[in-house]
Image (tube, rainbow, N blue to C red):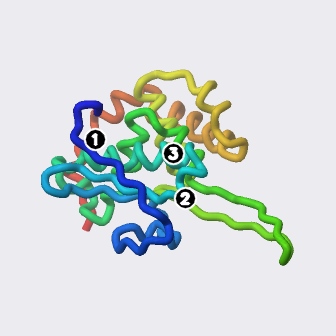
Amino acid sequence: MDQWDCKLEKVDVRVDVPDLQLIKGSGACGTFSIENGRAVIRYSSDMLKRPDALAATFAHELCHYLLCEAGDPPGGPDLMEHATDCAAIYLGFGVLLSNSARHMEHSVDVGGFGWRSWSAGYLSEEARVTATAMFAALHQYDLRDAERALKPHLRKDMQKATKAIAADHPNFAASLSQIDLFNWNFG
């Protein structure tokens, strides 16, 4: 990746950028585009307050770069963002993406107090954790460190996913190699 010609561009959240609807809560936290032959990743300046979420955003957007020549994923173009999340997890960013999928914040000010929450990305927390467990099974990684690094409420999901994968696919790599995505009927 260090050889990729890619420009990072911070966007002030007060600036109206049509492609950066992420500021309004669409689930996106950044954008990827090719401009004049160069990859450009834009991210909200608000993301600087949450470096973990910013790193997850960069992982996702860089996977757009990785996949830009691959064509549409199985299921068609509507699943491109989901496939991009999966690619980032496959590259080893699963815990980071899982932990940044949802965020809740408590606020107190002169008018009272309240909660604010938002989600980022395209896959649910549970789907991200399951994909992370699949990544670990594929590469035969021990998940104890990953489990400890997850937010507490995601650890049980990781344990359930790990058990289900082990029970249904004791040799996950062999099971995965039997799948021909080009034969799937998504119609």
**On the picture, is 8 further left or further right than 180?**
right
**On the picture, is 55 further left or further right than 103?**
left
Q: Count the marks: how many?
A: 3
Q: Is residue 135 visible?
A: yes
Image quarter (top left, top right, bottom left or bottom right) of the N terminus: top left
Relative to residue 185, is residue 149 depicted above or below? above
Residue that badge 1 annotates: 179
Say which element carries label 1.
loop
Say which element carries label 2.
helix
- The residue shown at (59%, 49%) is 50
Residue that badge 3 annotates: 97
Image quarter (top left, top right, bottom left or bottom right) of the C terminus: bottom left
Give the camera-side residue of 92 and 31: 31
**Sequence order check: which comes first, mark 2 or mark 3?**
2
Amino acid type for the residue under numbered disc 3: Leu
Q: Is residue 126 visible?
A: no
How far apart marks 2 and 1 lie (CA) works out to 41 Å
The residue carrying pointer 2 sits among few (fewer than 14), some (14 to 19) or many (20 or more) residues within 10 Å by Cα, namely some
Give the x, y percent position of residue 163.
Answer: 59, 34
Residue that badge 2 annotates: 46
Give the camera-side residue of 86 and 42: 42
Give the x, y percent position of residue 52.
Answer: 56, 43
- The residue shown at (82%, 69%) is 109
Give the x, y percent position of residue 59.
Answer: 41, 43
**Sequence order check: which comes first, mark 2 or mark 1?**
2
Res. 79 image quadrant: bottom left
Query: Which of the two discs, 3 and 1, sits closer to the camera?
Result: 3
